[in-house]
Image (spheres, rainbow, N blue to C red):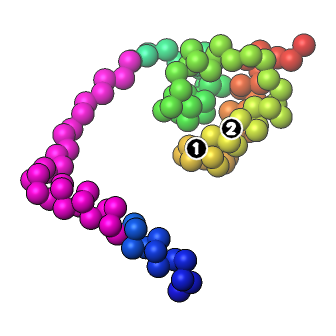
Amino acid sequence: MPKMMLPRLALTALCAFPLIRGSALAGEVMRFKSVSVELPQSDRAFPGGHEAEAVNNNCLACHSAGMVLTQPKRSKAEWTETVNKMIHTYKAPIDETDVPTIVAYLASMKPQP
């Protein structure tokens, strides 16, 4: 161990000791309590019946239809990137076979000019 490291370790131990000793002497017990959160309900679904089934089954778990339907116009490539981000970054449980259907639906909502 380098010579410079020993004074740092000693200093760290000296600084931490009062914190550990003080909390033990105070007799404070960490307590956890359950918290209940009520999320707003929405019975709004994506329009289109059977064509919207994959979007309703996959996207409504995290997003309201209203939030998605008010997004700006996007191309199929942009929607593909967004859906893939939901799957790979946010771990959305979307079946890969549903991706083309979801992308086609989202891109058709507001077609590019």
Q: Mark 1 packing: few (<14 Cα in 10 Å), some, or many (20+)? A: few
Q: Is residue 17 magenta?
A: yes
Q: Are marks 1 and 2 in contact (CB under 8 Å)?
A: no
Q: Position of residue 7 (x, y in %)?
A: 46, 74
- Which residue is at a point 32% across and 67% down the rendered structure image? 14
Residue 82 vertical placement versus 28 (above, below) = above
Residue shown at the point (55%, 77%) measured from the top left: 4
Q: In the image, is residue 59 above or below residue 8?
A: above
Bounds of the magenta span? Answer: 13-40
Give percent across and percent down for residue 81. 76, 38
Comes first in the chain, label 1 or label 2: 2
Tell which tag, 1 or 2, sits nearer the viewer: 1
Q: Toward the viewer: 100 or 27?
A: 27
What is the three-letter code of the residue carrying label 1?
Answer: Tyr
Q: Amino acid at mark 2?
A: Val
Question: Can the viewer see residue 98?
Answer: no
The quadrant the C terminus occupies is top right
Q: Nearer the viewer, residue 26 or 32?
A: 26
Q: Which residue is mark 1?
A: 90
Specify the quadrant of the image occupied by residue 66.
top right
Quadrant in which residue 104 is drawn: top right
Q: Is residue 19 left or right of residue 1?
A: left
Q: Residue furthest right?
A: 113
Residue at 9 percent across and 53 percent down: it is 27
Q: Secondary structure at mark 1?
A: loop
Taking depth in this image into account, of 23 and 104 the one nearest to the observer is 23
Asked if the magenta segment contains residue 12, the reply would be no
Residue 93: % across, % down: 54, 46
Q: Which residue is mark 2?
A: 83
Residue at disc 2, secondary structure: helix
Q: Can residue 21 be seen here?
A: yes
Left or right position of 45 against 70: left
